[in-house]
Image (cartoon, grey):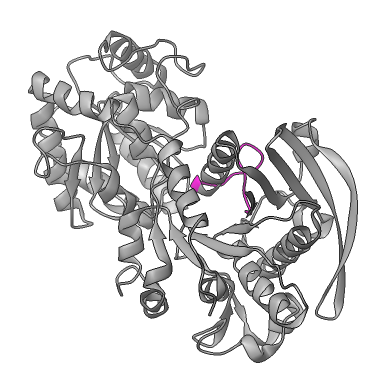
Amino acid sequence: MHILHLSSELHPYSKTGGLADMVGALSRNQAANGLTVTVLSPLYRGLMGRFPDLRPTDWRFDLRIGNHSQSGRFWESRPTANLRLLFVEHAEFFDRPTLYGDARGEYPDNAERYCFLSHAGALLARHLPDPPQWIHGHDWQAGLLPLLVTHCRRFDGWVDAPRTLLTIHNLAYQGIFPLEAWERITGLPRSYLHLEGAEFFGSASLLKAGLMHADVLTTVSPHYAHEITTAEFGCGMEGLLTLRRQDLHGILNGVDYAEWNTQTNPHLPDSYGPGDLAGKARIKAALQAEIGLEVRADRPLFVNISRLEAQKGSDFLLDAFEQVLDEDWQLAILGTGNPQLEAAVRRFAGLYPGRVAARIRFDAALAHRLEAAADFFVMPSRFEPCGLNQLYSLHYGAVPIVRDTGGLHDSVVDIRESSERPTGIKFWRPDAEALAHALRKALAIWRDSGLLDHFRWHGMTADFSWQRSVAEYQALYALPIDRR
């Protein structure tokens, strides 16, 4: 079976978040499992210099989209015999300093950029010598592709068109643009702009186009698949998703343990495992010294690695720690995001030197050291389609403290759910009081070393490898599809 993935990000070539990690890991593991896999992603600025394995192909093309002709070219990398990575070159659309926007906000032509990517994906799927049986698109940036396949099947003679699957990584991002730009940007007739098509509250939505026309829909965790059919998490699309409930499946993302491990990790100064935590203690002491915390083995270290945004609970994180100032603890925060929240984190670290440390930047190597040093990992997200840091934390022996939502619900086991196999602490309300209560629970666990070891053991021995996820996707690819 041949699978074509279409994604706006692909680790390690381009990344702003978990989307890139998921597509990179899933495609590699699918290929290792015997599938033929092609991934199509944009050729962003700098990739040719950073990745000398990229080679231009002879495949140049012209696409007629609306009244405009758009030219492109495919570049290629072949990591393995079963895995082919293709990057579409279009200097005007993709040769930019960042992926989606700059200091002024999102690029105003983002919808046009990623409609071009979808058209390139349809062209690729239709003309590859070994055509794919499935096109697997990711998020709103691939939302037009299922509609393109439907349109070409109905009106352009593509009778053997592949089936389509769209994975929702974050429903909050919907690819919205004005209705009057539809024909110019998509190259498709306005007849698709209606309630059961791409029209969404007086605008056009690429995500909605994909949700309406993909054969199968998935989310990146089972609980998120349920949540998005409710008004609280559905972002206005809960009615549509309820109608398509039988086609909607939740598959939890996995962890690439080749990269995220505590035994052979170039980012860690020591190694350790569930049966021997001496190396973790040494890493903690080194990390405390590195970031300016007091080197204290007798104080629990809480860590937060996140975008500093309201979605991630960053706005009430500091208030919660202020409510437990009477306890002994340390806090380290790594991340970037909202300028006001960045400033608040800096101020908080300045108020409590030696006790609180902040690093306002992206730093992958430091993230590994923080996870390894942490006693507790704090992840108070208002919503979290899957989440990856809680999975890394479990494997690194950092007990996660999470809001009970989305993938956090699916991957962390509270002691109230299982006293035999607990792995973390859950709280429900997204506010400082609820998080502070969870922090006091963590401090009680810290004072009981046997209980702390009990949590750590079950977290570190839990299996969130990609093999499970790959098997679930392959089962979906095997489903008979009743095309409406």
Q: Quadrant of residue 75?
A: top right
Q: Residue at x 16, y 41 (%)?
A: 414
Which residue is found at the position 74% from the left and 52% from the top?
Answer: 96
* Position of residue 128 measured from the top left corner of the image (x, y, whole percent): 79, 54
Q: Is residue 372 magenta?
A: no
Q: Nearer the viewer, residue 224 or 294?
A: 224
Res 51 → quadrant: top right
Judged left or right of residue 475, residue 331 is: left
**Residue 240 point in image, percent of width and height:** 42, 79
Give the side of residue 390 with respect to residue 102, left or right: left
Rendered location of residue 81, percent (x, y): 71, 33
319 or 171, nearer to the observer: 171
Q: Is residue 173 visible?
A: no
- The answer to whether residue 304 shows anywhere in this view is yes
State the extent of the magenta-drawn residues as a range: 6-18
Q: Can you tell which quarter of the image residue 29 is in? A: top right
> Vertical placement of 151 versus 214: above or below?
below
The percent position of residue 313, horizontal first and vertical second, equals: 31, 52
Q: Is residue 88 above or below residue 208?
A: above
State the residue at coordinates (37%, 80%): 239
What secondary structure prevails in the magenta region? loop
Q: Is residue 8 magenta?
A: yes
Q: Nearer the viewer, residue 312 or 137?
A: 137
